[in-house]
Image (cartoon, rainbow, N blue to C red):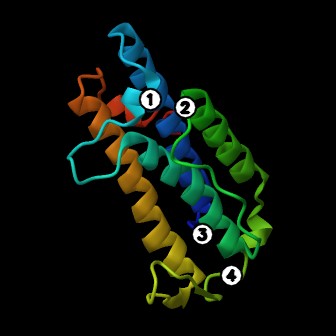
């Protein structure tokens, strides 16, 4: 049995990014088939008071890079915007995958208890051990936003199923 460590989350996040890329491609194909513009598709929301599809994709691309970077002691890379077109999101998600592939297990060794402070919103900047940020805050957020990509597209009639969340397989 393999040991789970902080570096294990790099693969988890890469799988989340791959799922978001796959879902985006299926959504774009479906929208194009219906004569719906990319911008209209990227503005789809699950509910009026929720962020649109483009925002969900931005968070997946950005969080999947910035949180492992912080935990590894690296400067977080610049993120992508929420107002890109499909090609722009594809590039951003590819960049996230490339960034994750460049990380090494050694960068995460001994980092579990490293204190990290991050301002979540004005006036709220907690300090937690790096492992808590990565395994609780980042993992939950990334998974939530990938699930929102799926839910938004599914609610708009894109033919998706559970297997679409695992385009890279289970191994």
Say left or right for 138 vs 151.
Answer: right
> The residue tagged with tag 3: helix, strand or loop?
loop
Name the N-terminal-most of marks 3 and 4. 3
Name the N-terminal-most of marks 1 and 4. 1
Could you tell me if the residues under marks 1 and 2 are in contact, i.e. CB atoms within 8 Å?
Answer: yes
Q: Nearer the viewer, mark 3 or mark 4?
A: 4
Identify residue for label 1: 39
- Residue 151 seen in render: yes
Identify residue for label 2: 85
Q: Which quarter shows the N terminus?
A: bottom right
> In the image, is residue 141 above or below residue 16?
below
Could you tell me if the residues under marks 3 and 4 are in contact, i.e. CB atoms within 8 Å?
Answer: no
Within 10 Å of disc 2 (Cα), the crowding (few <14, some 14-19, many 20+) is some
Work out how far the residue at label 3 is from the one at label 1, CA to CA, in angstroms: 39 Å
Name the N-terminal-most of marks 1 and 2. 1
Work out how far the residue at label 1 is from the one at label 2, CA to CA, in angstroms: 7 Å
Work out how far the residue at label 1 is from the one at label 4, CA to CA, in angstroms: 41 Å
> The residue tagged with tag 1: helix, strand or loop?
helix
Identify residue for label 4: 111
- Front residue of 44/60: it is 44
Could you tell me if the residues under marks 3 and 1 are in contact, i.e. CB atoms within 8 Å?
Answer: no
Q: Residue at x 55, y 53 (%)?
A: 13
- Residue 2 seen in render: no
Work out how far the residue at label 4 is from the one at label 2, CA to CA, in angstroms: 37 Å
Could you tell me if the residues under marks 1 and 4 are in contact, i.e. CB atoms within 8 Å?
Answer: no
* Residue 21 picture location, percent across and down: 52, 33
Identify residue for label 3: 5
Q: Which residue is drawn at 24% across and 43% down?
A: 46
């Amino acid at each position: 049995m393999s040991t789970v460590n902080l570096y294990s989350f790099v693969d988890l996040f890469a799988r989340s990014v791959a799922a978001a890329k796959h879902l985006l491609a299926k959504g774009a194909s479906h929208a194009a088939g219906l004569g719906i513009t990319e911008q209209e598709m990227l503005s789809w929301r699950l509910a009026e008071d929720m962020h649109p599809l483009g925002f969900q994709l931005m968070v997946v691309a950005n969080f999947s890079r910035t949180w492992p970077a912080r935990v590894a002691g690296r400067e977080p890379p610049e993120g992508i915007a929420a107002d890109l077109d499909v090609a722009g999101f594809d590039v951003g998600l590819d960049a996230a995958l490339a960034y994750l592939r460049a990380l090494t297990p050694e960068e995460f060794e001994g980092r579990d208890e490293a204190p990290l402070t991050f301002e979540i919103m004005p006036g709220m900047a907690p300090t937690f051990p790096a492992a808590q940020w990565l395994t609780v805050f980042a993992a939950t957020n990334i998974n939530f936003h990938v699930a929102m990509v799926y839910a938004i597209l599914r609610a708009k009639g894109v033919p998706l199923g559970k297997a679409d969340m695992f385009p890279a397989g289970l191994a």
